[in-house]
Image (cartoon, rainbow, N blue to C red):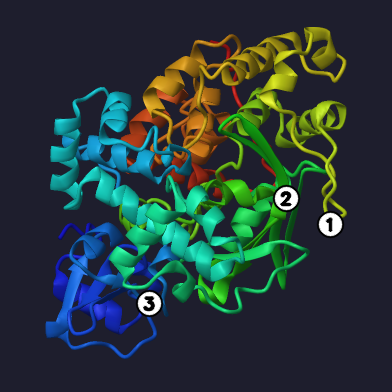
Amino acid sequence: MNTENLQNDDACYRAMQARDARFDGCFFTGVTSTGIYCRPVCGVKTPKRENCRFFGHAAQAEHAGFRPCLRCRPELAPHSLVWSFQDATSILAHQAARLLDEPAAWSTESATAQALATRLGISDRHLRRIFEAQFGVSPLQYLQTRRLLTAKQLLADTQLPIAQIALVSGFASVRRFNAVFAEHYGLNPSQLRRSKPAAASRGGMAIRLGYRPPYDVPAMLAFLQKRQINAIESVAGSAGNTCVARTFCLESAGTLHRGWLTAEFVPERHHVLLHVSDSLHGVLPLVIHRVRALLDLDADPKAINRVLHSRFPDGDGLRVPGALDGFELAVRAVLGQQITVAAARTLAQRLVDGFGEAIDTPIPELSRLFPTPAVLAQLPGDALGQLGIVRQRQAAILALARAVADGQLQLHGGAQVHATVEALKALPGIGDWTAQYIAMRALRWPDAFPAGDVALHKALGVQDEKYPSRAAEAASQAWKPWRSYAVLRAWAELPAPVTIKKIATTA
């Protein structure tokens, strides 16, 4: 068993006895007397120690013949993301797992060992060898568990037709879905479905998304609220109302899906309640994946704090805000070059008001979508100039839009980080700060580090050095592989009146 955060099985058993939510998703317990596997937070009576087997991933438990618990629901657990820069094969195996976690890769055409190996630039035989050594299962077994648990969540939390659940979970046919589901879980999908799924709100279905504590919810909402663009997002951070509402447009299999969502924190239960419009049903696993990234729900605070706590003791609950749409985040990063957060928000607001598509939602604050890459790619430079966007950033936005629209650039958690960062820096008007910021938030790279950030220099006390960027880079070596989190913690240490500005990011 490979559980990075727990030293041995006895430690796992103690965490399970305590129902410690900090270890949720870090391991799963298979109970030999029942044939069921559970999360550490499961509320059932604690089984005897001799009846427990511990697994680092749900796929390992299912490969060993255990079925998921219907009470604690393993599909609700945050994913276990392990990062290491010591072992090249481990890095490669975890990169493969990241690609398999991306729902966009679940289609039958791309979800093969050969296709995955090609993306990673290795042979499928080598991929299977390093993957099984790291996770104890093959890549396709790992993927099948991810698909099945996604389908199980949709069966329990939604009223989607079983045929639609089968397709959005990556199965080629309903017949194949029914057969695999029955083979693994001992019952067919209709038997598992609850008679009364979670209550819907404002016309959208409700889905629970778990996370590990501690989580500084006010800090996350304050970060998003400070950057809020009216008409496409609304962030509430007051007592009793901790909710993020968004419009959302994503492309899948050549089709644009437009809709809205709300994500409401339920801190006492360590989960987020997600409400999604009916128009996004066809891409629901992808929406769930993007929301988990937006709110950084899969972070493992224990692993991160082990590296960062001594330097940033007040930041244990801070998360790195992600993005629903990597292209949108990249455009907003370009607009934020060399100016304040407030000024960047003003420019982004003009962009949305001028070129964002109107959308009807039941939420009064939400009425537009962020402009798509195809729309911005066709704009003449003077159209952006009339919004007050300087020429250098006009060129950067147009180049970015064309690269994404043409499929040359992927800006999501499944993209290859280093190649994407270099591709970003090759575009006009995009330098290292912008590329690192995009990597941190859109690519979900936990070790991104914008060494040239002026606010970061001030927070680290290196602003008076002859070469502050080099000094910041040197200081950051001790925080690998969690430097993105170190950046957020450093920014949080700045006094409230400090204005965060960035250096020029011209390539």
Q: Is residue 121 left or right of residue 366?
A: left
The residue pinned by badge 2 equals 260
Q: CA distance from mark 2 to mark 3?
A: 31 Å
Residue at position x 29%, y 79% in the image? 16
Give how far apart the Cα atoms at labels 3 and 1 are: 35 Å
From this viewpoint, is residue 301 visible?
A: no
The location of residue 347, given as percent across then percent down, is: 79, 28
Residue 195 seen anywhere in this rendered image of the structure: yes
Q: Within 10 Å of the Cα at label 3, are there few (<14), some (14-19), or many (20+) other Cα atoms?
A: many
Crowding at mark 2 (Cα within 10 Å: few <14, some 14-19, many 20+): many
| Residue pointed to by mark 3 | 41
- Per the image, label 3 sits on a secondary structure element best described as loop
Measuring 24% from the left and 39% from the top, which residue is drawn there?
A: 93
Determine the CA span between mark 1 and mark 2. Answer: 9 Å
**Amino acid on which the number 1 mark rests in the picture:** Pro
Horizontal and vertical percent position of residue 507: 53, 10
Q: Position of residue 320 (x, y in %)?
A: 51, 47
**For this rendering, which residue is in front, 103 or 470?**
103
Quarter of the image containing the N terminus?
Answer: bottom left
The total of numbered circles placed on residues is 3
The residue sitting at 45% across, 74% down in the picture is: 192
Taking 2 as reference, is 203 left or right?
right
Q: Position of residue 196 (x, y in %)?
A: 61, 78
Q: Residue 377 occupies which quadrant of the picture?
A: top right
- Does 157 appear above or below 316? below
Marks 2 and 1: in contact by CB < 8 Å? yes
Q: Amino acid at mark 3?
A: Val
